[in-house]
Amino acid sequence: MGSMEGRTILVTGASSGIGRASALALSSAGADLWITGRDQGRLEELAERIRERGTTVHVAALDVTDAARLDELARRIGEDPAGVQGIVHSAGALAHDYATSDDGVEMTVATHVLAPFRLTWRLAPVLRAAGQSTIVTVASGGMYTERFDLAGLEMTPGDYDGVRAYARAKRAQVLLAHEWSRRWARDGVRSYVMHPGWTDTPGLATSLPTFHRLGPLLRRVEEGADTAVWLTSGAAGEEGTTSGIWLDRRPRGEYYLPWTRPRRSRSADGEDLWRWCARRSGFSDSDVPLQ
Ligand SMILES: NC(=O)c1ccc[n+]([C@@H]2O[C@H](COP(=O)([O-])OP(=O)(O)OC[C@H]3O[C@@H](n4cnc5c(N)ncnc54)[C@H](OP(=O)(O)O)[C@@H]3O)[C@@H](O)[C@H]2O)c1
């Protein structure tokens, strides 16, 4: 992986686990950073470590489901002369109990789908103006169990199941990541989606304690973050930007189970997801052009 000096990357979920390890590896490669998460103390501790390496870091403590805070962050970044040339969307959690964001959106969808949609949309002018930029979404192999089905994406209190909600949201992330490439590739924006492999993080310990007992079989956070960091550097070029999910620096298939194959074309599903995200985010068609 080459030097990332002169590039500024925004990492969400940087206060813990894979996002934190990604931020550290990116700063080691010379990148300047914006780091976000909810826990101000852990972000400040990380920022201290990054500054010791001599790179610039901006801290933004926020909940990604808070639309106003995301808009404010995008505005701050837009006003900074350095802008950003990349985003790593790592914020995420598997929640076993049903909850909603302040806007009334089921929390798994709000965190994994609508937050990246909003933040990326708000930063799109900066990313597109950069000439060469990368978006990396940390999805999950958990998505292999679910087909993309817009009607079932946002689960209700009556049918909520945290593992299924998570798998569906991660499946939607794959589609959304490819939509960004499809729409903005001509402006030099490359969007990749990856699976970190099962990684020993605080999030895994809380959400899937049985899995977490695999202990030594799990990856270290640096290993979980490796592909995300490598993709952020632009090393993959055009490959795997409009289909596939990356694991261990290689693009893999999106479907292993026959019943998860899409019933319609990728562009039809992508278009529907895009419209749904725009509507659920409260954007009008003129705010978010459909093409
Ligand atoms: N670990 C695995 O084996 C594994 C496997 C597949 C996919 N993933 C994915 O990897 C990503 C990182 O997970 P992790 O395992 O590193 O878990 P983690 O250690 O719990 O880290 C999750 C990060 O996301 C942030 N976050 C969660 N909800 C947020 C919200 N509403 N607003 C702002 N920040 C929020 C957390 O912030 P705070 O801590 O400050 O609240 C934290 O920084 C997730 O997208 C997860 O789905 C992980």
Image (cartoon, rainbow, N blue to C red):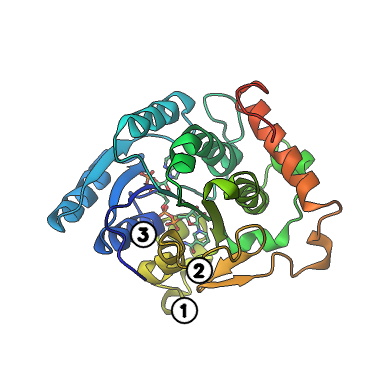
Badge nearest the viewer, 3 or 2: 3
Please name whichever residue, 46 or 215, is drawn nearer the observer in this view of the structure: 46
State whether residue 188 is above or below residue 284. Answer: below
Please, what secondary structure does the residue beneath circle 2 have?
Answer: loop
Q: Is mark 3 within 8 Å of ligand 1?
A: no
- Say which label, 1 or 2, has the lower sequence index: 2
Please rate how many residues cluster around mark 3, counting C-alpha atoms within 10 Å: few if below 14, some from 14 to 19, many from 20: many
Please name whichever residue, 196 or 7, is drawn nearer the observer in this view of the structure: 7
Please rate how many residues cluster around mark 2, counting C-alpha atoms within 10 Å: few if below 14, some from 14 to 19, many from 20: many
Q: Which residue is mark 2?
A: 198
Please name whichever residue, 85 or 169, is drawn nearer the observer in this view of the structure: 85
State whether residue 122 is above or below residue 22. Answer: above
**Residue name at image x 53 percent, y 35 percent:** 121
Q: Which residue is mark 3?
A: 22
Mark 2: which amino acid? Trp
Q: Which residue is mark 1?
A: 217
Mark 1: which amino acid? Leu
| Left or right: 179 in relation to 90 | right
State whether residue 42 is above or below residue 277. Answer: below
| Circle count | 3
Residue 259, x across and y down, in percent: 83, 62
Q: Are marks 1 and 2 in contact (CB under 8 Å)?
A: yes
Please name whichever residue, 205 or 254, is drawn nearer the observer in this view of the structure: 254
Alpha carbon separation for disc pair 3 and 2: 15 Å
Please rate how many residues cluster around mark 1, counting C-alpha atoms within 10 Å: few if below 14, some from 14 to 19, many from 20: few
- Say which label, 3 or 2, has the lower sequence index: 3
**Residue name at image x 68 percent, y 23 percent:** 285
**Residue name at image x 61 percent, y 50 percent:** 173
